[in-house]
Image: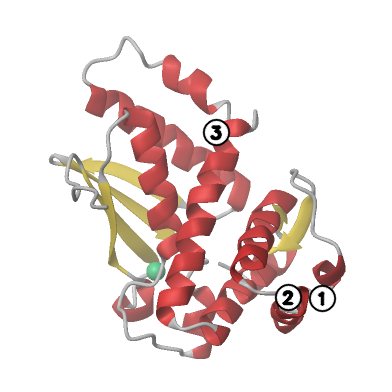
Amino acid sequence: MAQDALEQKQLPAYAIRICYDIIAEETPNRDALQRIFALAGLARYGESPPPMDSTPSITLREYERLIGVVWQVFDEIQAREIFRRVGQRGFQRLTRSGVLMYTQFLRAFDSIGTKRERVALAMGRLTAELTRALGYRHEFRREGEDFILDIYDCPYCAELLRRQIKPKEEHVCHIPVAFYQAALNWASGDPHTVQEISCRLTSGEAYCRFKIYWNVVLKERV
Ligand SMILES: [Zn+2]
């Protein structure tokens, strides 16, 4: 994505508010939270959190930088936990908001074929909406029994790429993995597994590729 698009495109406030809330929950005090936001160049949110609404608030570049700071200050397991929670909460927020009218468009597909076909249509719509709202191109398609999602200019590894930071793990884009896992489970009523199968951090491609393994899931253990 062009540099000026990154600097100009503004994300809705809720995108940053969700990160703010999760980091606040995962850190022991306000100082830690303020420090993280200051490192990301977002000191303006150190004192008061952004609203949970769609006001244009931070640039894509700032969002990518905040994700990079989480990688910098936490270890890989802690960072993954924070990102997974951000993805899950992001999807929860979407189902509660009227922005995408998610339930309505899902219901519109009720008469169509198999559950997998309905979910494919719903996911196609969702990813098209996200392309529009966030400015990153999302391409979603079926592949045999499963689904493939490509996110171009993926923001979740952008800062690692820029700074040439290479975590031990090859797949680092945890936010969309958790987000789409929640979306799929919600849309189909059944759990499925989402994996990042190719990250541009190591692949050199323009996109990160995610695979949704339909009806493949581990049993929950307690
Ligand atoms: Zn990636």
User: Who's the residue at 80% across and 59% down the image?
Assistant: 49
Residue 163, image x and y in percent?
A: 52, 89
Residue at the disc numbered 3: 95
Q: Label 1 crowding class (10 Å Cα cut-off): few <14, some 14-19, many 20+?
A: some
Q: How far separated are the C-alphas under marks 1 and 3?
A: 30 Å
Residue ranking furthest to the top: 111
Task: Look at label 3 and name its amino acid.
Answer: Thr
User: Who's the residue at 64% across and 33% down the image?
Assistant: 97
Element class at badge 3? helix
The quarter of the displayed image where residue 10 is located: bottom right
Queried on whether the Cβ of the residue with tag 3 lies below 8 angstroms from ligand 1, the answer reads no
Q: Earlier in the sequence, mark 1 or mark 3?
A: 1
Tags 2 and 1 in contact by the CB under 8 Å rule?
yes
Q: How far separated are the C-alphas under marks 2 and 1?
A: 5 Å
Residue at the disc numbered 1: 43
Residue 159, image x and y in percent?
A: 54, 79
Residue at the disc numbered 2: 37
Queried on whether the Cβ of the residue with tag 1 lies below 8 angstroms from ligand 1, the answer reads no
Is 168 situated left or right of 102 in this image? Answer: left
User: Who's the residue at 33% across and 51% down the image?
Assistant: 149
Q: Is residue 175 above or below residue 148?
A: below
Q: Earlier in the sequence, mark 2 or mark 1?
A: 2
Count of all numbered marks drawn on residues in the image? 3
Front residue of 18/1: it is 18
User: Who's the residue at 40% across and 76% down the image?
Assistant: 77
Q: Is residue 153 visible?
A: no
Task: Look at label 1 and name its amino acid.
Answer: Ala
Query: Which quadrant holds the N terminus?
Result: bottom right
Q: Label 2 crowding class (10 Å Cα cut-off): few <14, some 14-19, many 20+?
A: many
Is 149 situated left or right of 126 in this image? Answer: left
